[in-house]
Image: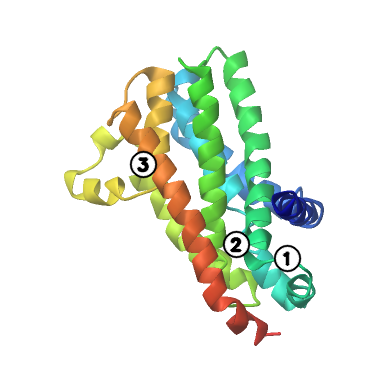
Amino acid sequence: MEIEKSVNKIWAVCWKDIKIYYAKGPVIIIGVLFPLFLWLSFYAGKGLNAKEGMASLLALTLFFTSSSVTPTIPPWETRQRTIEMLLTRPITIREILIGDVMASTIFGLIFALFSLIIGIILGAMPSNMLLAIVIIVLMSFGFSALGVVFSALPSDTPADVILISNVVKLPLIFISGVLIPIKDLPKWMLPVAFISPLTYPTDLLRILYIGNGYFSITTDFVLTVIFSILFLLAALKLHEKTIFMRLQRR
């Protein structure tokens, strides 16, 4: 019974986020159009076929859509003074944050589905569709949790959090094998690529689409799961520490 109540609370927060924060013009531009044009400039511009670039398109789409809104929700609600209303309800901080992650995960999956369907139309099919769907769900969840980690900054200004998230996210796409395969990266860059959470799911998608990856499927999958869990745990822990600092910025 308690689990059912908790699930209902999480879904209520998720639905609130979807109605208020998602499907907005700036979200579509930053989360969808930016990765699409970036992908076109690197892959379509080189004349590569759809199958060679589909792994990168999916990785970019999920990375930007899933982490585009969650960083702004807590600071925005702090500025609007709705954070107090949530905290006075019979709901925990963890349930609120998991609801935020759920909303962002759903948002990322919707746009990833579009990319997946476009790839199928163009003849770019993963070798294992079930595994591809599983890794896409994990990526959407993990990067949504990463966005919540960024939002732990006790600020009431969304731009502050967006600046920090972009400083981290933009370099990652160039060192994680998304636009440049890991095997083609300079040797001095490899240690950084190995600690990037974007490296392993991207590598796994490359294996599924073109049969060529840097790591094994098991390594990529296990590390993707580990990063996703770590991001969620870090988000929950950080927000528990900064929530009262946030309330002081009302």
Query: In front: 126, or 245?
Result: 245
**Residue that numbered label 1 is attached to:** 91
The answer to which quarter of the image holds residue 236 is bottom right
Name the residue rendered at 48%, 24% in the picture: 131
Q: Secondary structure at mark 1?
A: loop
Asked if the residues shown at circle 2 and circle 1 are in contact, with their CB atoms under 8 angstroms apart, the answer is no
Residue position for label 2? 71
Judging depth in this view, the residue of 131 and 211 nearest the camera is 131
Work out whether mark 2 precedes mark 1 in sequence or the reverse, and give the earlier one.
Answer: 2
Tell which residue pokes out farthest to the front in this image: 1
Mark 3 residue type: Leu
Looking at the rendered image, the disc whose residue lies closer to the viewer, 2 or 1, is 1
Please state, as top left, top right, bottom left or bottom right, where the C terminus lies in the image.
bottom right
Q: Position of residue 59 (x, y in %)?
A: 49, 37
Compare residues 246 and 11 and report the one nearer the observer: 11
In the rendering, at what x and y percent does residue 86 appear?
76, 70
Residue type (three-letter) at the residue carrying disc 2: Pro
Tell which tag, 1 or 3, sits nearer the viewer.
1
Residue at x-position 28% and y-position 31%: 215
Q: Secondary structure at mark 2?
A: loop
Q: Which numbered tag is attached to residue 223? A: 3
* Amino acid at pointer 1: Ile
Decide if residue 178 is in sight here: no
Sequence-first disc among 1 and 3: 1
Query: Which residue in the rendered view is the most extreme toward the left?
Result: 187
